[in-house]
Amino acid sequence: MKQSYLNDEIITIAKKIYKIDLSGYKPSFIDRRLKLIAMRKGIFNARQFKDLIINSGEFNHYLEEEIPVHVTSLFRDHDFFNSLINQISNQYNNAGILKIWHPGCSDGSEVYSMAMLMESRMNHIDFKLLGTDISHESILTARSGSLNCKNLHEVQSLFRASGGKGSVREHVISSANSFVIRQKLYDKIRFSRHVLGSDSKFTKFDVIICRNMLMYYNDKAKEKITKDLYDSLHTGGILAIGKQESIHNLEITSKLKILDKKNKIYKKLE
């Protein structure tokens, strides 16, 4: 396919008809995602793509589900989780209530991972977790409380490597095909659809975990998103981003203290 699917006309049509703004993504990323959609739909040129967007009343759903990258798993990157839970324990061990937000939560695996770690390490305080995502399907999956099945021994190993104490069985009910979060822990978690950088900002959280999302946005959108995340944190709150991401040249950088350079964990100073 020689002709690029990334052009202003397609982006304009998607925003005008479906209120979906694709302009904040990096050109290289959105081009790859649009080409992937085209391949799956059997589209061979930009004109066919535009016709489909204009004439298909349900194409907005396809854009919302296929443009974002949904890569997640339980305790993904246990080194990160171990560092984060230690930072939270050191700073908030005597907190009355702790509020944690996971933008771009996908199917909820990492939200549930964090919930299990919090319950095992800090069950003496009240904590609440919010997971948000642009994808309706991801939110529905997350709300089910049922996680992709892995070997229980493997999950236990990852749980302990991530800083968890005790047994993962205290937090999940395992079966042949899935893990189901126990009701006591599930009640501490809420999932909601939210478009980061576009929808209204939330206030206020003690911890925000936004990993592996900023890398897909252009500089202007990344500046807006990180500002929204910063504004949604209490002073002294913790912000965590992906290891491969950088915020060193953004406006908020001077207002953050590095807690863990390797795992990209920061503290809001003011």
Image (cartoon, helix red, strand yellow):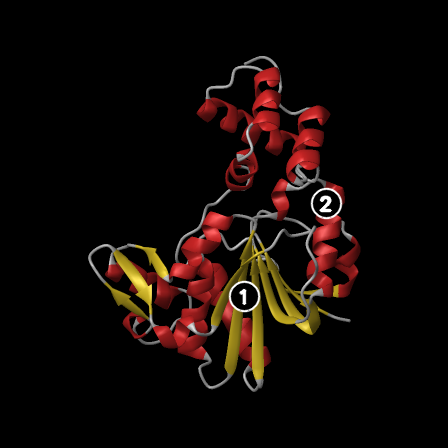
Instruction: Looking at this view, name the residue that lies furthest to the top.
Output: 2
* Nearer the observer, 3 or 200: 200
Callout 2 secondary element? helix
| Quarter of the image where the C terminus is located | bottom right
Which residue occupies 34% across, 59% down?
146
| Quarter of the image where the N terminus is located | top right
Which residue, given by chain and number where applicable, does mark 1 sit on?
130
Residue 29: x percent and y percent? 60, 33
- Which of the labelled discs sits on residue 225, or is there none? none
Q: Amino acid at mark 2?
A: Ala
Which residue, given by chain and number where applicable, does mark 2 sit on?
221
* Nearer the observer, 28 or 89: 28
Which of the marked residues, 2 or 1, is nearer the chain's N terminus?
Answer: 1
Q: Amino acid at mark 1?
A: Leu
Residue 19: x percent and y percent? 67, 41
Badge 1 crowding class, 10 Å Cα cut-off, few under 14, some 14 to 19, many 20 or more, is some
